[in-house]
Image: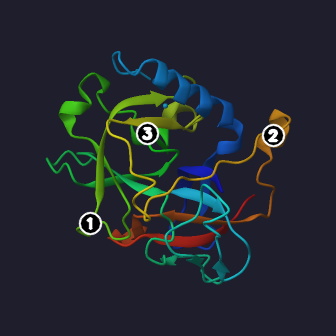
């Protein structure tokens, strides 16, 4: 079950006291549903203009997921985490986080359209969830011509057998503030120009969203303080030295 989207962090990535701030998905469940419905309604019109991932795990080494009984959240292989990996993280088991995608475009402004820029997660065959700050600088009037893509079904960013999809619309939360007010409402939905083959490719699956909460207060407190979570994504292993990884990483964190 996905409970957050990485918004911003402080301190050093290799510090045990490193703090990461997440967009709390439980508070945006209805917004996500409205966004998907709005995009479906505008499927034949112009693009909608202006919106690594935390997942609940059991506190054990292996998270066994019964693919026959659930419709989301199960990877191609079972998740296995090392409990002591609070800092630095570790390589994930290949294809154990099959709901994670790589968002790619020329974010470094060097002409490379295949650069891994940010992560996202699969809502369904048509939509990907990500942070608003990942896509807020994209020119939405020319999305298709910019060759902006997501890569799904991968463990290593350089592997050959990748499922590549372009996205043609972006829905950014209308109350997203950006860095001026600490990235409030940092959430976005991407519409893919061609659906993913979720029923055919076993290495691609949907993420699970938190259950509906009876009150907004319940949503704001989910997950509860002290919950053990996992963060997944590609990126820097060591911020001071900019050591990057091509292999999907995972690590334990605790909600505070």
Q: Residues within 10 Å of mark 3 (few under 14, many from 20)?
A: some
Badge 1 density bin: few <14, some 14–19, many ≥20, Cα 10 Å: few
Q: CA distance from mark 2 to mark 1?
A: 39 Å
Of pointers 2 and 1, the one earlier in the residue sequence: 1
Q: Which residue is mark 1?
A: 161
Q: Count the numbered circles shown.
A: 3
State the SS at label 2.
loop
**For the point 39% across and 37% down, which residue is it?**
135
Mark toward the viewer: 2 or 1: 1
Q: Is residue 142 above or below residue 63?
A: above
Element assignment for label 1: loop
User: Which of 240/47 is in front?
Assistant: 47
CA distance separating discs 3 and 1: 20 Å
- Which residue in the protein does label 2 denote? 213
Q: CA distance from mark 3 to mark 2?
A: 25 Å
Q: Is residue 246 above or below residue 26?
A: below
Asked whether the residues under the numbered discs 3 and 2 touch, taking CB atoms below 8 Å apart as contact, a structural biologist would say no
Render colour scheme: rainbow
- Kindly identify the residue that appears in the image at 60 percent across and 66 percent down: 67
The front one of 208 and 184 is: 208
How many residues crowd mark 2 within 10 Å: few (<14), some (14–19), many (20+)?
some
Mark 3 = which residue? 126
Relative depth, front residue between 78 and 156:
78
- The answer to whether mark 2 and mark 1 are in CB contact below 8 A is no
Give the left or right position of residue 62, taking residue 129 as reference.
right
Report x, y in % for residue 200: 40, 58
């Amino acid at each position: 079950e996905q409970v957050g989207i990485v918004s911003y962090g402080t301190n050093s990535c290799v510090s045990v006291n490193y703090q990461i701030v997440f967009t709390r998905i439980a508070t945006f469940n209805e917004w996500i549903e409205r966004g998907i419905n709005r995009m479906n309604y505008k499927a034949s019109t112009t693009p909608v203009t202006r919106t690594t991932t935390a997942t609940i795990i059991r506190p054990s080494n292996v998270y066994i997921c019964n693919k026959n009984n659930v419709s989301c959240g199960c990877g191609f292989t079972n998740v296995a985490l090392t409990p002591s990996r609070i800092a630095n993280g570790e390589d994930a088991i290949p294809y154990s986080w099959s709901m994670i995608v790589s968002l790619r475009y020329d974010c470094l402004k060097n002409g490379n359209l295949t650069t891994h820029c940010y992560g996202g997660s699969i809502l369904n065959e048509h939509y990907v969830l990500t942070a608003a700050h990942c896509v807020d600088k994209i020119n939405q009037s020319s999305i298709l011509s910019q060759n902006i893509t997501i890569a799904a079904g991968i463990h290593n960013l350089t592997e050959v057998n990748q499922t590549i999809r372009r996205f043609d619309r972006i829905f950014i939360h209308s109350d997203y503030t950006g860095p001026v007010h600490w990235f409030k409402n940092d959430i976005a939905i991407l519409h893919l120009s061609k659906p993913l083959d979720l029923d055919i490719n076993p290495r691609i699956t949907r993420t699970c969203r938190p259950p509906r909460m009876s009150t907004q207060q319940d949503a704001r407190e989910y997950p509860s303080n002290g919950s053990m979570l996992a963060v997944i994504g590609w990126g820097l292993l060591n911020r001071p030295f900019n050591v990057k990884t091509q292999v999907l990483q995972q690590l334990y964190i605790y909600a505070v």
